[in-house]
Amino acid sequence: MAHFIDRRLNSKGKSTLNRQRFLKRYKQQIKRAVSDAVGQRSVTDVESGEHISIPKQDISEPLFHTGKGGKRTVVHPGNDQFTAGDRIDRPPPQGGQGSGQGDAGNSGEGEDDFTFSISKDEYLDLLFEDLALPNLKNSQFDQVVQYETYRAGFQTDGVPTNLDIVRSLKGSMARRVALTAADRRKLREAEEELEALKADKHDNTVAIIELEKTIAQLKAKIAGVPFIDTFDLRFKNYAKKPVPTSKAVMFCLMDVSGSMDQATKDMAKRFYILLYLFLSRTYKNVEVVYIRHHTQAKEVDEQEFFYSQETGGTIVSSALKLMDEIIRERYQDSDWNIYAAQASDGDNWADDSPHCREILIKKLLPVTRYFAYIEITERQHQSLWREYQSVEEACNNFVCKHIISVSDIYPVFRELFEKTSETSGGG
């Protein structure tokens, strides 16, 4: 009997490729689940992964089986209770059955939807697929490219420090079991036969000698299989991927006057976090500047930005002026890519709204890659919205959108950064 040992190298990151193949196959179902999860997640865990559930009917595989064949004779008994056209009442539900459409059983176990977890990177890939940042310029990227090391499965060669002992021993054990299984079975049968011959009262000397010789050969053959072979060795594989080295700053402007309640601020925060994560995929260094305002503007930290309570009126131009001052002081360098997002419920002094339009067009938008204004309100739009709409018509790097509930955040975000023929060719 000849033994064949497959010494072909396994592909690197085999399990990773299988996972990517699965995600690609059920991409539409997973994207729907990811889109639904955006509005349901808490504000603090947007950066983590996600648990995805796929209905069992979506992952069912075709099944082939042998049907009933041949000639059959079937006798269908009649009944003396019903005739054609009678209406039969629905039988009452029994134990373990309900009014749903699923299959119920009496064993206490059912068939659930297929649930699995995706990592943060996979979640963000699906979340931001087909989206692109507008107004990117190749000149804004540094010439030095940095690389990030990540795990990429296992390989059959490498340096001793990357040797995975447990996986190597598992491979060794599997190889030895596969190569010696037939010989061990023959050895066991020969030893049982030898015991039987020794217990027999007849003279079986010749047969016993032959069996002992066979047993010795089998033991030598089994012992000749090495405990570990070079083919068994598995080394941790590491690969490198380039990461962007350019830098960006994200300005978060928000009205914190008495008309902005905590629910409205939470909706604004969800939008800000989506924008921050999206920018982080393009720029390695993303600084965030928080500017809150009522009648006066102030640069604050994240905690005070979202959770402090204020009363009084609203003057939006104070925040725009402060943003212009900060840009001139800290981000005048051309290496910085400036993005801004402003959230408000639309309240503003009527005389101040034209002033906001003038500051945007003359000072902020010429140095800003993209400026998004989000109005979170169920009321009718006021003067600030009308002025901002005129800015949107005049400048291609400014956009204003309307949000009513949490479920509107992700669709509006996709509208803002939907990839077009112009953005797909950018930096």
Image (cartoon, rainbow, N blue to C red):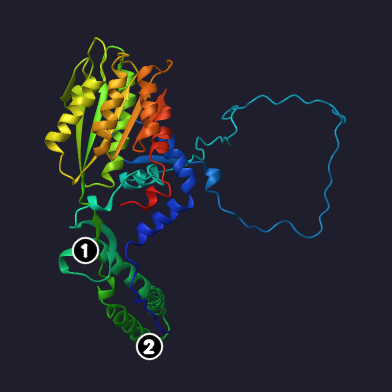
The quadrant the N terminus occupies is bottom left
Q: Position of residue 269 (x, y in %)?
A: 29, 28
Q: Is residue 153 above or below residue 105?
A: below
The one nearer the camera, 375 or 322, is 322
Identify the mark at residue 165; answer none if there is no mark: 1
Q: How far, Cα to Cα, is label 1 from label 2? A: 42 Å
Residue 415 versus residue 235 in the image, above or below: above
Q: Secondary structure at mark 1?
A: helix
Q: Earlier in the sequence, mark 1 or mark 2?
A: 1
Q: Mark 1, residues whose alpha carbon is within 10 Å: few (<14), some, or many (≥20)?
A: few
Residue at 81% across, 25% down: 87
Check disc 2: other Cα within 10 Å, few if <14, some if 14-19, many if 20+: few
Furthest toward the left, the residue is 329
Mark 1 vs mark 2: in front: 1
- Rendered location of residue 362, percent (x, y): 26, 31
* Residue underneath mark 2: 210
Q: Nearer the viewer, residue 240 or 408?
A: 408
Q: Residue furthest top?
A: 312
Q: Which mark is residue 127?
A: none
Give how far across and how far down residue 154 sits, in percent.
28, 63
Q: Is residue 130 above or below residue 256?
A: below
Amino acid on which the number 2 mark rests in the picture: Glu
- The picture quadrant where one finds residue 173 is bottom left
| Residue 84: image location, x then y, percent | 87, 31
Is residue 46 among the parts visible in the rendering? Answer: no
Tell whether label 2 touches label 1 (CB within 8 Å).
no
> Which residue is at a point 37% across and 38% down the rendered structure image?
396
Residue drawn where x is 40% and y is 46% of the image:
129
Amino acid type, mark 1: Ile
